[in-house]
């Protein structure tokens, strides 16, 4: 077996997603997730050669998960084909403008960004430490969710609060989903035969977390997430933009603490909060189809806010050649795409209903009519492939 595959690790506080990818052709050789890490019933499940398999971890945490992952890769004869490990890290602050190989300084740099992502960066570091322990011979890279947005101009990333909070503590907008935006903007140009150096692309990455971005000539010039992933669009459980005085209002009216309100806005709001049913867009769409009023309202708010913010992204790019939908909702929900593309008709979009229905469930392609002045399309994002390609390039 040639040694060119990349092991991708995406470590959360109680889960660890992994995949082995061939960076040359994008083949996903194996992929899986370890869940409920640190709990009694932790387990790993994965998909390999079309089969789904799983093992229990008996209460093991991240270290046990990576040890089990190593054992499983050895058993399947996949370990010797792995050339390097690529880690996904959420926050690189202003320190990391691009992906890099892991060194002591890089680890310190990620630690220095913990105050910007207190939930995510420590978990990412745990994954890096476990991988270094169990795969000591392999070079490792880190790919940051924030780095693609480091090209945003100051007018797009500066909050209108006292400047010293930025200069002293780095309080500014950073944005997330950068790896997806980098992949999708390149893919849009491939699909439409456009030169990336001469392109105005607006992208909606709509998963359980959702944001949109303005990509001008291949560089991010604005995005809707901010200091944290809470800012911007309505999401599965996140509120997106609210009046910051919501904090004092909820404190005075209900006595909630800062942490409780942060938790409500991050975990109990969005589609879930309005519908009082689910954060899962499919469930909300099904309920709305059956006449559930709050589910209908949740979708209406989701689409209205999305269209309004996409139009804002078009200000950053100074017009739009292409609008791409990606992520679980963007790649599958014809309903949401239809509402949003119609709301943006003033920017030159004309929806092709048939193409919109055809491009779901893994199919990607244009969903606007041939006569449409601007092109709307669906792109299947592939953040793992981007991480694998970055890692392969870094070790080459
Ligand atoms: P992601 O975080 O990218 O995996 O996306 C998860 C979201 O995609 C969930 O809200 C799902 O409900 C949504 N999703 C997946 N398939 C569909 C579908 N067919 N229609 C609407 N939403 C979908």
Image (cartoon, rainbow, N blue to C red):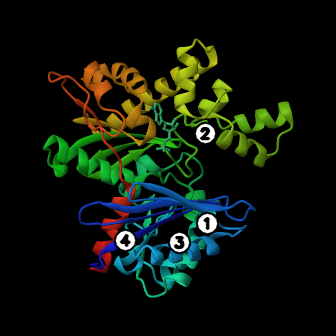
- The residue singled out by tag 3 in the image is 69
Report x, y in % for residue 215: 30, 46
Q: Residue furthest top?
A: 291
Label 2 secondary element: loop
Q: Is residue 54 above or below residue 352?
A: below
Crowding near the residue tagged with mark 2, few <14, some 14–19, many ≥20 C-alpha atoms within 10 Å: many
Circle on res. 123: 1
Q: Return the disc, 1 or 4, that comes first in the chain's sequence.
A: 4
Question: Cβ(mark 3) to ligand 1 < 8 Å?
Answer: no
Q: Mark 2 or mark 1: which is in front?
A: 1
Disc 2 versus disc 1: distance between alpha carbons? Answer: 20 Å
Q: Return the disc, 2 or 1, that comes first in the chain's sequence.
A: 1
Q: Is residue 367 above or below residue 289?
A: below
Q: Mark 4 or mark 3: which is in front?
A: 3
Q: Return the disc, 4 or 2, that comes first in the chain's sequence.
A: 4
Q: 256 or 192, which lies in front?
A: 192
């Amino acid at each position: 077996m040639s040694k060119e595959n990349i092991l991708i690790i995406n470590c959360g506080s109680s889960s660890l997603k992994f995949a082995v990818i061939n960076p040359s052709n994008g083949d996903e050789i194996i992929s899986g997730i370890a869940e409920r890490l640190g709990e009694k019933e932790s387990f790993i499940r994965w998909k390999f050669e079309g089969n789904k398999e799983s093992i229990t971890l008996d209460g093991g945490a991240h270290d046990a998960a990576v040890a089990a992952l190593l054992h499983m890769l050895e058993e399947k004869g996949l370990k010797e084909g792995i050339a390097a490990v690529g880690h996904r890290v959420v926050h690189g602050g202003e320190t990391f403008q691009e992906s890099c190989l892991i060194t002591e300084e890089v680890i310190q740099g990620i630690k220095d960004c913990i105050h910007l992502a207190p939930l995510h960066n420590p978990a990412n570091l745990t994954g890096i430490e476990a991988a270094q322990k169990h795969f000591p011979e392999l070079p490792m890279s880190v790919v940051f969710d924030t780095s693609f947005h480091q090209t945003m101009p100051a007018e797009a990333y500066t909050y209108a609060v006292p400047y010293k909070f930025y200069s002293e503590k780095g309080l500014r907008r950073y944005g997330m989903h950068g790896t997806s935006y980098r992949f999708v903007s390149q893919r849009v140009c491939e699909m439409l035969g456009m030169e990336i150096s001469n392109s105005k692309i607006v992208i909606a990455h709509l998963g359980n977390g959702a944001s949109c971005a303005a990509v001008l000539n291949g560089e991010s010039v604005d995005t809707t997430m901010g200091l944290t992933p809470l800012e911007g669009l309505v999401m599965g459980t996140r509120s997106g933009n609210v009046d910051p005085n919501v904090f004092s209002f909820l404190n005075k009216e209900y006595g909630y603490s800062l942490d409780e309100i942060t938790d409500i806005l991050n975990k109990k709001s969005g589609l879930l909060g309005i519908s009082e049913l689910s954060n899962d867009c499919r469930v909300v769409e099904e309920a709305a189809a059956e006449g559930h009023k709050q589910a209908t309202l949740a979708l209406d708010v989701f689409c209205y806010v999305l269209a309004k913010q996409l139009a804002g992204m078009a200000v950053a790019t100074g017009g739009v050649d292409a609008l791409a939908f990606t992520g679980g909702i963007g790649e599958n929900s014809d309903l949401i795409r239809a509402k949003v593309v119609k709301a943006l008709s003033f920017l030159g979009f004309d929806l092709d209903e048939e193409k919109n229905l055809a491009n779901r469930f893994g199919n990607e392609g244009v969903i606007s009519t041939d006569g449409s002045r601007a092109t709307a399309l669906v792109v299947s994002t592939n953040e793992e492939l981007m991480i694998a390609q970055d890692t392969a390039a870094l070790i080459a």
